[in-house]
Image (cartoon, grey):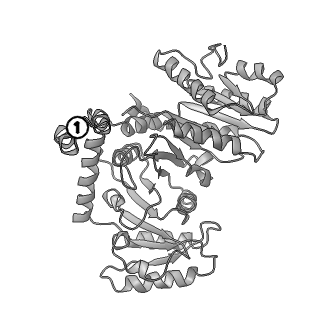
Amino acid sequence: MQTPLRIVIAKPGLDGHDRGAKVVARCLRDAGHEVIYTGLRRTPEQIVRTVIDEDADILGLSSLSGAHGHLFPRTCELLSAAEMGHVVVFGGGIIPDADRDALYSAGMKAIFGPGTTSQEINDFISTIMERMSLDEKVGCGDGNDWKWGD
Amino acid sequence: MELEEARDGSRLALSRALTLVENGAAFSTEEEGIILGITGAPGVGKSCLVDQLAKAYTERGEKVAILAVDPSSPVSGGALLGDRLRMDSADLEELVYMRSVATRGEAGAVPSVVIGMTNVLKECGWKRILIETVGSGQSEFRIAAIADTILLVEAPGRGDVIQAEKAGIIELVDVVAVNKSDLTGAESTAADISNALSAGSKEIPVALVSAHSGAGVSELIELMEKAGGNEISRTRWRERMYSEWMRLLTQHPDFENTLDSLESGGIDLSQAIEKMR
């Protein structure tokens, strides 16, 4: 049996809207991955701790509060500091286009907004798996410029 | 090697070592530990109670490792592991290590790899281990293969007294906790279970707890300590055999191909069994 990917889906910050996170978690489950959902209102420190304990390969962050500009890069920074820079980080929620470049520079590999299909998210994950299997470094701390949509 | 660093206290190395074992590597240890199995039906409050137990142990300065099992999808093989969201203690407390485990194609409330995972934890100094099974019914005993002490979690409003008279997991447990003690009916549920158990040969205490407020948790811990260890009984060896047999089957290199052949009608079940021997 192929070993499933372990993916953490996390809600950093204070917003309580997690329908998006749950839909993404469900879509990844149905694609055969093991998804760990953190629940609401986690700090970047708690999320990094979860990624370490769960030995996750991929982290999805969801924010609808407008605090993504601080919380997402902070999480990537803490992951790299904890020797978890190999973890692939993607984000979702209400993320204005103007804010996205800063998140990509922080090491995130994809940002999914409203209207994204589950198919697209699964395509992204498959692409990540392919790149990982070729030993390409696509983690948040690997300094690889590639991002989804390039 | 991961294990060296994990023994020296690296959390990351411990996680990786656990992944290796979860993916099929064998691991045994001479180190001792105390394994508490927490089982019970879905929704009775196992995860919240595990969180409270972990908090109580860490307040005494003890390290606690939690392995929380949730089911894998029989269709996609994926899993949604959601025990963590009820465990606040898991996210920051240095004395707690919490790992979600999927059943990965095995029947039963605890997959066989969990035995190896507890060995890794013991080896790395995590002596107190809590295993939360998937929400399970009456005839699921696999936890008996692993745990030194078994706690059955119940809740009010789940059926009448005859439920506690039925044969099953209730005969193997060391302590019963009736959770949600703040709800109406909790006391009569506990009394019904006590009555049913009083006819048995083994004395099994019944405690009222609230995983929500923490009421009754320290008394529950005392009861579990008094209940002591589950001796390595015939039942336990039987469950270990089942568990190991299942692991050998599901990790057989031809397992998936054989399923494919069965699905396409290329072979029948007896041919499949022959192939797996």
Identify whether B272 is placed above or below B55.
above
- Image quadrant where residue A3 sits: top left
Residue A83 appears in the rendering: no
| Residue nearer the viewer, B188 or A112 | A112
Residue B181 image offset from top left, x and y in percent: 60, 76
| Residue nearer the viewer, A15 or B96 | A15
Which chain does the numbered disc 1 sit on?
A: B
Give the quarter of the figure containing the N terminus of chain B: top left
Callout 1, which amino acid?
Answer: Ile
Q: Is residue A122 left or right of residue A150?
A: left
Identify whether B104 is placed above or below B222.
above
Identify whether B206 is placed above or below B79.
below
> Looking at the image, how many numbered discs can be counted on the residues?
1
Q: Residue at x 54, y 66 (%)?
A: B44
Residue A115 image offset from top left, x and y in percent: 73, 32
Identify whether B240 is placed above or below B16.
below
Residue B275 appears in the rendering: yes
Local packing at callout 1 (Cα closer than 10 Å; few below 14, some 14-19, many 20+) is some
The residue labelled by disc 1 is B267
Q: Is residue B172 left or right of residue B192?
A: left
User: Which secondary structure lies at badge 1?
Assistant: loop
Residue B77 image offset from top left, x and y in percent: 44, 40
Residue B216 image offset from top left, x and y in percent: 57, 73
| Residue nearer the viewer, B24 or A25 | A25
Give the quarter of the figure containing the C terminus of chain B: top left
Q: Which residue lies furthest to the front in this view?
A: B265
Q: In this view, does B21 lie to the left or right of B211?
A: left
